[in-house]
Image: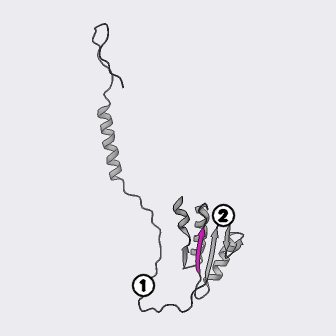
Amino acid sequence: MSMSVGSDSGEDEAMCDMNTTPLIDVMLVLLIMFIITIPVMTHAVKLDMPQPQPDQPLPEVRPEVIDIEIDFDGTIVWNGTVVPNIDTLESYFRQESQKDPQPELHLRPDARSRYDTVAQVLASAQRNRMLKIGFVNTADFRDL
Protein backbone atom coordinates (compact mmCIF):
# COMPACT_ATOMS: atom_id res chain seq x y z
CA MET A 1 0.00 0.00 0.00
CA SER A 2 1.18 3.52 -0.60
CA MET A 3 0.10 6.88 0.67
CA SER A 4 0.39 10.24 -1.01
CA VAL A 5 1.64 12.80 1.52
CA GLY A 6 2.06 15.75 -0.81
CA SER A 7 3.98 16.93 -3.80
CA ASP A 8 7.24 18.85 -3.99
CA SER A 9 5.70 21.69 -5.95
CA GLY A 10 3.37 22.60 -3.13
CA GLU A 11 0.22 22.23 -5.19
CA ASP A 12 -2.63 20.35 -3.62
CA GLU A 13 -4.05 17.81 -6.04
CA ALA A 14 -7.39 16.15 -5.60
CA MET A 15 -7.23 12.38 -4.99
CA CYS A 16 -9.16 10.46 -7.62
CA ASP A 17 -8.77 6.98 -6.08
CA MET A 18 -11.92 5.12 -5.11
CA ASN A 19 -12.26 4.15 -1.47
CA THR A 20 -12.65 0.35 -1.61
CA THR A 21 -12.91 -0.27 2.13
CA PRO A 22 -16.74 0.01 2.26
CA LEU A 23 -17.01 -2.18 -0.84
CA ILE A 24 -14.88 -4.89 0.76
CA ASP A 25 -16.90 -4.67 3.98
CA VAL A 26 -20.17 -5.10 2.09
CA MET A 27 -18.78 -8.05 0.12
CA LEU A 28 -17.60 -9.79 3.30
CA VAL A 29 -21.00 -9.33 4.94
CA LEU A 30 -22.73 -10.73 1.85
CA LEU A 31 -20.34 -13.70 1.77
CA ILE A 32 -21.06 -14.50 5.41
CA MET A 33 -24.82 -14.20 4.79
CA PHE A 34 -24.63 -16.62 1.85
CA ILE A 35 -22.61 -19.11 3.87
CA ILE A 36 -25.13 -19.01 6.71
CA THR A 37 -28.23 -19.24 4.53
CA ILE A 38 -27.07 -22.07 2.25
CA PRO A 39 -28.60 -25.32 3.50
CA VAL A 40 -26.18 -27.96 4.63
CA MET A 41 -25.73 -30.58 1.93
CA THR A 42 -26.43 -34.06 3.24
CA HIS A 43 -25.44 -37.22 1.50
CA ALA A 44 -27.65 -40.07 2.66
CA VAL A 45 -27.33 -43.76 1.93
CA LYS A 46 -30.52 -45.77 2.24
CA LEU A 47 -29.99 -48.85 4.36
CA ASP A 48 -32.65 -51.44 5.09
CA MET A 49 -31.81 -52.45 8.65
CA PRO A 50 -33.41 -55.56 10.15
CA GLN A 51 -36.01 -54.97 12.84
CA PRO A 52 -35.04 -56.31 16.28
CA GLN A 53 -37.07 -59.26 17.49
CA PRO A 54 -36.24 -60.15 21.08
CA ASP A 55 -38.15 -63.46 21.06
CA GLN A 56 -36.33 -64.77 17.98
CA PRO A 57 -33.89 -67.59 18.84
CA LEU A 58 -30.29 -67.41 17.72
CA PRO A 59 -29.54 -69.40 14.57
CA GLU A 60 -28.08 -72.83 15.23
CA VAL A 61 -26.16 -73.03 11.96
CA ARG A 62 -23.59 -70.33 11.26
CA PRO A 63 -23.88 -69.02 7.71
CA GLU A 64 -21.16 -69.59 5.15
CA VAL A 65 -18.68 -66.73 4.71
CA ILE A 66 -17.72 -65.57 1.23
CA ASP A 67 -14.59 -63.40 0.97
CA ILE A 68 -14.64 -60.92 -1.88
CA GLU A 69 -11.41 -59.03 -2.43
CA ILE A 70 -11.05 -56.05 -4.76
CA ASP A 71 -7.48 -55.28 -5.82
CA PHE A 72 -6.13 -51.87 -6.78
CA ASP A 73 -6.34 -52.72 -10.48
CA GLY A 74 -10.04 -53.66 -10.33
CA THR A 75 -9.53 -57.43 -10.08
CA ILE A 76 -12.34 -59.10 -8.13
CA VAL A 77 -11.46 -62.27 -6.22
CA TRP A 78 -14.23 -64.60 -4.95
CA ASN A 79 -12.93 -66.92 -2.19
CA GLY A 80 -9.47 -67.00 -3.78
CA THR A 81 -10.72 -67.38 -7.39
CA VAL A 82 -10.44 -64.48 -9.83
CA VAL A 83 -13.80 -63.39 -11.26
CA PRO A 84 -13.42 -62.54 -14.97
CA ASN A 85 -16.25 -59.97 -15.18
CA ILE A 86 -19.29 -58.49 -13.43
CA ASP A 87 -21.70 -60.86 -15.22
CA THR A 88 -19.95 -63.85 -13.68
CA LEU A 89 -20.10 -62.16 -10.29
CA GLU A 90 -23.84 -61.61 -10.77
CA SER A 91 -24.35 -65.31 -11.46
CA TYR A 92 -22.41 -66.17 -8.26
CA PHE A 93 -24.63 -63.81 -6.29
CA ARG A 94 -27.78 -65.34 -7.84
CA GLN A 95 -26.69 -68.83 -6.79
CA GLU A 96 -25.72 -67.79 -3.27
CA SER A 97 -28.88 -65.76 -2.63
CA GLN A 98 -30.98 -68.93 -3.06
CA LYS A 99 -29.24 -70.71 -0.16
CA ASP A 100 -30.79 -70.97 3.29
CA PRO A 101 -29.22 -69.55 5.42
CA GLN A 102 -27.86 -66.97 3.05
CA PRO A 103 -24.06 -66.61 3.16
CA GLU A 104 -22.32 -63.55 4.58
CA LEU A 105 -20.28 -61.42 2.18
CA HIS A 106 -17.02 -60.11 3.58
CA LEU A 107 -15.84 -57.37 1.25
CA ARG A 108 -12.12 -56.52 1.39
CA PRO A 109 -11.32 -53.64 -0.95
CA ASP A 110 -7.71 -52.59 -1.33
CA ALA A 111 -7.03 -49.08 -0.04
CA ARG A 112 -6.03 -48.05 -3.58
CA SER A 113 -8.98 -49.68 -5.34
CA ARG A 114 -11.38 -47.49 -7.32
CA TYR A 115 -14.65 -46.55 -5.69
CA ASP A 116 -16.44 -47.35 -8.95
CA THR A 117 -15.42 -51.03 -8.78
CA VAL A 118 -16.49 -51.35 -5.14
CA ALA A 119 -19.82 -49.65 -5.94
CA GLN A 120 -20.43 -52.05 -8.85
CA VAL A 121 -19.84 -55.07 -6.59
CA LEU A 122 -22.18 -53.67 -3.92
CA ALA A 123 -24.85 -52.82 -6.50
CA SER A 124 -24.61 -56.29 -7.97
CA ALA A 125 -25.02 -57.86 -4.53
CA GLN A 126 -28.01 -55.65 -3.79
CA ARG A 127 -29.68 -56.42 -7.15
CA ASN A 128 -29.42 -60.13 -6.41
CA ARG A 129 -30.89 -59.70 -2.90
CA MET A 130 -27.80 -60.49 -0.86
CA LEU A 131 -28.68 -59.39 2.68
CA LYS A 132 -25.55 -59.86 4.78
CA ILE A 133 -22.72 -57.64 3.51
CA GLY A 134 -19.85 -56.27 5.56
CA PHE A 135 -16.54 -54.50 5.04
CA VAL A 136 -13.58 -56.26 6.58
CA ASN A 137 -10.14 -54.90 7.51
CA THR A 138 -10.89 -51.24 6.92
CA ALA A 139 -8.09 -50.20 9.29
CA ASP A 140 -5.86 -49.68 6.24
CA PHE A 141 -8.01 -46.72 5.18
CA ARG A 142 -7.22 -44.66 8.30
CA ASP A 143 -3.67 -44.00 7.11
CA LEU A 144 -4.73 -42.39 3.84
Which residue is painted at 66% across and 63% down in the image? Answer: 74
Residue 107 against residue 143 in the figure, above or below: below
Mark 2 = which residue? Answer: 74
How did the renderer colour the structure? one colour
Q: Which is nearer the N-term, disc 2 or disc 1?
A: 1
Position of residue 58 in the picture relative to residue 72 (left or right): left
x, y percent for residue 42: 42, 61
Main SS, magenta region, reads: strand
Position of residue 86 in the picture relative to residue 34 (left or right): right
x, y percent for residue 56: 45, 91
In the image, which residues are magenta?
Answer: 103-109
Front residue of 127/97: it is: 97
Residue 80 against residue 58 in the figure, above or below: above
| Residue 112 figure quarter | bottom right
Mark 1 = which residue? Answer: 52
Query: Please, which residue is most extreme toward the top here?
Result: 9
Q: Amino acid at mark 1?
A: Pro
Which residue is painted at 33% across and 52% down in the image? Answer: 37
Circles 2 and 1 in contact, beta carbons < 8 Å: no
Disc 1: CA contacts within 10 A as few (<14), some (14-19) or many (>=20): few
Disc 2: CA contacts within 10 A as few (<14), some (14-19) or many (>=20): some
